[in-house]
Image (spheres, rainbow, N blue to C red):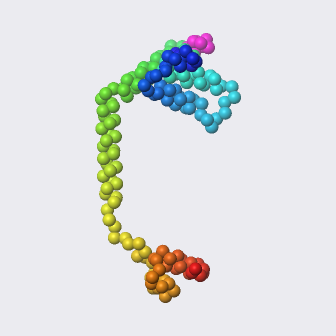
Amino acid sequence: MIVLGDEGIEKTWGLSTTQSNEAANRALSSRCPQNVKFSKSITARVGSAILTCNNGPGDAERKISHRVVLVMNRGQKRYHAAEQKRNTYSQGHSRSPSTQTRHLQQDAKMRRDKLKRRQQAQLPSDYKKHQLDDSSSSRDSIPDGESPEKRLRCSVRRDHKYHCL
């Protein structure tokens, strides 16, 4: 609930992480994409995004409804309470040590599997460069001392009725 200004900057100066700033930027970019022009609703969208970041989706909707003097029925209140509860549980679950340990183990397994696939893909092949070139047609017009690349260039040009340079 800090308003951005000189006092807010002084209160937040020197924090060790910028994750809250990144989360706010991510929320703003999802609510206000750059490829869409908003003529009048941009301030409301920004305010709604920040309110949701600070309070959660259920409480933010309830506060907006109360502020605009909209009467919510029992089903809407129940829905917003359940949405807030899901969000709170999801945040607590993703931050729990067991979930973080499981994610790290899954990441390590994926990296090991990728390394194994990469090592298996580097098996030596029996292919040799220029083994498919027609060597009989290029030998009569190009001396033996020239490179295979020039032989290939000349044979391709000959097929297209160009002369070898």
Question: Looking at the image, which is closer to me, 113 or 4?
Answer: 4
Is 74 part of what is drawn in magenta? Answer: no
Q: On the rendered image, what quadrant is the C terminus found in?
A: bottom right
For the point 34% across and 40% down, the residue is: 107
10, above or below 148, in the image = above
Evaluate whether residue 75 shows in this view: no
Would you say 99 lies left or right of 67 here?
left
Place of residue 36 in the rendered image (x, y in percent of width and height, measured from the top left): 64, 35
For the point 46% across and 28% down, the residue is: 19
Would you say 3 lies left or right of 101 here?
right
The residue positioned farthest toward the bottom in the image shown:
140
Place of residue 37 in the rendered image (x, y in percent of width and height, measured from the top left): 67, 33
For the point 57% across and 81% down, the residue is: 164
The residue positioned farthest toward the right in the image shown:
39
Evaluate whether residue 94 shows in this view: yes
Place of residue 148 in the rendered image (x, y in percent of width and height, measured from the top left): 46, 77
- Name which quarter of the figure residue 29 lies in: top right
Would you say 39 lies left or right of 106 here?
right
Majority secondary structure of magenta residues: loop
- Name which quarter of the figure residue 89 lies in: top left
For the point 34% across and 70% down, the residue is: 126
| Numbered range of the magenta stretch | 65-72
Place of residue 144 in the rendered image (x, y in percent of width and height, measured from the top left): 45, 84
Would you say 70 lies left or right of 13 here?
right
137, above or below 72, in the image = below
